[in-house]
Structure formats: structure tokens, C-alpha cells
Amino acid sequence: MRRKLLLGLAIIGLIVLCIPAVDAQNAFLCPLPTLSSGLETPPPSIRKPIEGDQTVEWFVARCNTQQTEYVFEGQADSVYTVLLKGAQDSIGTPCITLVSADGSLIGTGTPIVSNDRTPTLTISYALLPTSGQYRIISMPCNNSSGFFTIQLISTIIQPVKFNTVVQGTFDPVQQSIGFGFEGQAGDEIYVQFDPQDSQITVELFCIPRADCGNPTGSIPINFRGGLYNTPIQLPLTGKYLITVRAPMSSIQLSINRLEPVAIQYGDKVDVEFDTDTSLHAFRFVGHIADMVQIHVESDDKIDTELSLIQNAAVLASDDDSGRNYDPEILNWPLTMDDDYLIIIQPLQFNNTGHVTLMLSSSHIDLDEKPQLVTLGLKQKYAGMAFTGKAGEHIEIKVLNLTNNANAPQISVSQNGKVIAEAHQTGGSGSGLIFVLPEDGKVSVMISIMNPTQSTLEVSVKHLDGS
């Protein structure tokens, strides 16, 4: 009996040895389709009805490639949100799109983070361009499987007028708010939020989205959680949608159409913030190597923020570096001749009061002789300029006369483009040699890494033989 048992175990062992090895990493992956002659025809779609504010359940079997289309009748200019959400034990995230009867794309599912960390996609604030039939196409992808729910939600866009503060409450299902407004091509708008939060995310869309000339209908914006944002120039005349997500229950918003007041160096301007005015904008002409100073005085009556902007990029910003915690931008060096924008705004919408803004500048010329500049905690940058010709070999030297541990940094620009840089981490000086690409003025920006006060000597030499 024992001999028969040992013989049986040996036979089983041989069978096991003859079974091909299975790669554990790929054991549960779906098999690749085999192509016999030409491309395989995908399985036909399953079509099911869905109505507004209805939730349907969709089961995705593992390795299934069959898509399901949920069909509904929509009216022109109505707005819907599609929400796909996985069960706790679902795997991966499927793909969803919203299309019209002729197959035109209306929206594509975007992942969002749900409170329970289950796979979640949303097509938010989809505007239907015409009355007719629409399809939500649900397609297995990303190795997804399990139970999912698809919800079609009738959505309201909250209207906003320029320069008016409105409040919105976040929908717990959609986790976003949609604000709609109308603008003209070329309008410069500036979006403000209260409270300000680095976790706020914002998207701007054309309505209908196809008007923006890209699949998503989005307009690129540079948004920094409500602090020191940049203006947005509207590409066309028509309707727009701003969607906002934030980790809070409600938020206040103001969309300002900028009409900057022209000012110049030496001007002193008085402005008032009240319940109808949450922002003031000014525009001035700056020149290469101008050292710009912007001071704000409020007599400690209102807390404001200040930003200096060029070509939709924030160059410098501040909220409390000046006297009485007023904002100031001190000796900021300009790198090219251009128009520059100043924006001043209260820290909160309900802050009111009177402020005075002062704009001035200085200029350091390196053409004649070496120059001395003092940098420290309040002023970490200095700008200066010289004139050169294309093809010239130029040598710039910066010597720290005060603090040997505070190595100066050098950035050289011409026509707004950086053409040479030197970054030192120690020592008492920096230097570089480079060739000028063009004729004309050249901007030199000097900075220090350490806020310890340092006096620097800056010199430029046009090398012989160039």
C-alpha cells in the first residue's frame, strides 16, 4: 500500500513538472486579441435608455471589450453632468464620453478624487448645442472590471456679471460649481476668490465648447489658488463657463473685466475699495533695466495685495512688506521695453477703504563705468543695462565687497530672452563671458541667495578682438 502511494505521488510530480510555467505578474492580464486576416470587428454596442437625474448600474466583466451606450433626449442649451463611480471592490477606471447623435464630441470623462477613494469620473457642465438625441458611451479600459454607477445630472450654471461678487455652494455629488458669463473678443478678465486657497482648481471653457477649436473647449489659464493670478484674454465674443473645485462648502467669486488706468513714473494715485469695487488695475510703459518701485499706503485701514504683471506672467507680488504691513515692490528690474500691468486688490471682498499707490523708477547704466549696488533682505535684485553689437564678446564681473559667503547670481537678457547666466554657491564674486546675439540694449540682473546685506561691484568689458 505504501509503495502504491509513493508511486502515485511520483506520477503527480511528473505531471506538475510537465505543466508550462506561468508568469505570476501576467497571470490575470486579459489575453491579447488574435488577428487572423485583417482587423477584428469590435463587438456591437449595447444601447440602453437613461433620463435626466437618473442613476443606472453598469457591470464590467473582466476582459470585456463591449461598450454600452446610454441614450437620452436633450434640449438645446440645457446643461448636464455625467458622473461615473465605481463600487468599493471595482478595479480600474473605465472610459466615458458624451456625444451627439452624429457622433460629435461633447465631453470626455475627467478623473476626480472621491471622498471614499473609489474610481470616479465626471463630465462636468456639458452644454447641449441642439435639441436631439445624445449618447453616454461607457467603454471598458484600463483593465477595469466590477460594478459602476452612471448618473446623468441636470445642472444649473450660475450667472455672473463682470465686477460683481457672487457666492456659490459646492454640490456634494459634482464637487464643483459652474459660473457662466458673456464677454467680447479681446476682453481681459481677472478672476478673484474669497477665501483664497492653494487647493482651488479652475477651468475656463467656451460655450459651446467646440467654439474654442480644441476637443475639450478649454482655455489655458494660469491660476494660483486665488493669489496673484494673471489676466485672461478672451478669444471670441460669446458665452463662457468657469468651473471651480475646492475643499470647502462655499466660495465667493468675482470676474473683473480689466480697464487699466494709464500711469507713468512719478505718479501718485488715490483709489477707493468699496462693496462694488474689489480690484484696481494700472498700466505703464517700462524700459529695459528700469528699477521699478511700487509703494502702497493705506494708513493701516485695509489689507491689500499687489502684483506686477507682464504678458500674462506675474513678475513680482507682495502683501505686507511695506510700512504698516502695506504691500510694496522694491527696485524690481525690467528686462525689456514693454507695457506692464499693476493690480492691487483687498485680501478679502468685504474689506473697504482708501489707499494711495506710488510708481517710480531708477536706472543703472553700465556703459560708462563699474557700478555699486547694495542688496539685502528688502532688495534681493538689481537691474542694469549696457549697449552692445551682435557678435561682440562681453565679460561681466560681479564682486561682493561685503560678505564673502554671499555669492552673487547673474542673468543676462536681450529682447526678453535670457542669453547668459552664472550661478555661484560660494565665494566672493561671479563672472561670465558670452557673445551678443543682436545689436542693442542688454539687461543684466544681479541677485543674492542670502538676505545678508551685501555691496556688489558690477562691471562690463567689451573684450578686444571681438
Image (cartoon, helix red, strand yellow):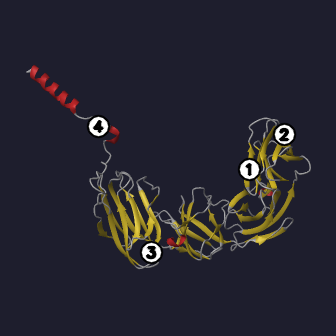
Q: Nearer the viewer, mark 2 or mark 1?
A: 1
Q: x, y (%) of residue 174? A: 46, 64
Mark 4: which amino acid? Val
Which residue was labeled with disc 4?
A: 22
Q: Nearer the viewer, mark 1 or mark 3?
A: 1
Furthest residue in direction left, as rendered: 1
Which residue was labeled with disc 2?
A: 400
- Please tell me which of labels 4 and 3 falls first in the chain: 4
Q: x, y (%) of residue 220? A: 58, 63
Which residue was labeled with disc 3?
A: 128
* Residue contact at pointers 1 and 4, CB within 8 angstroms: no
Indicate the quadrant containing the N terminus: top left, top right, bottom left or bottom right. top left
- Please tell me which of labels 1 and 4 falls first in the chain: 4
Q: CA distance from mark 1 to mark 4?
A: 57 Å
What secondary structure is marked by label 4?
Answer: loop
Res. 331 in view: no
Furthest residue in direction right, as rendered: 368
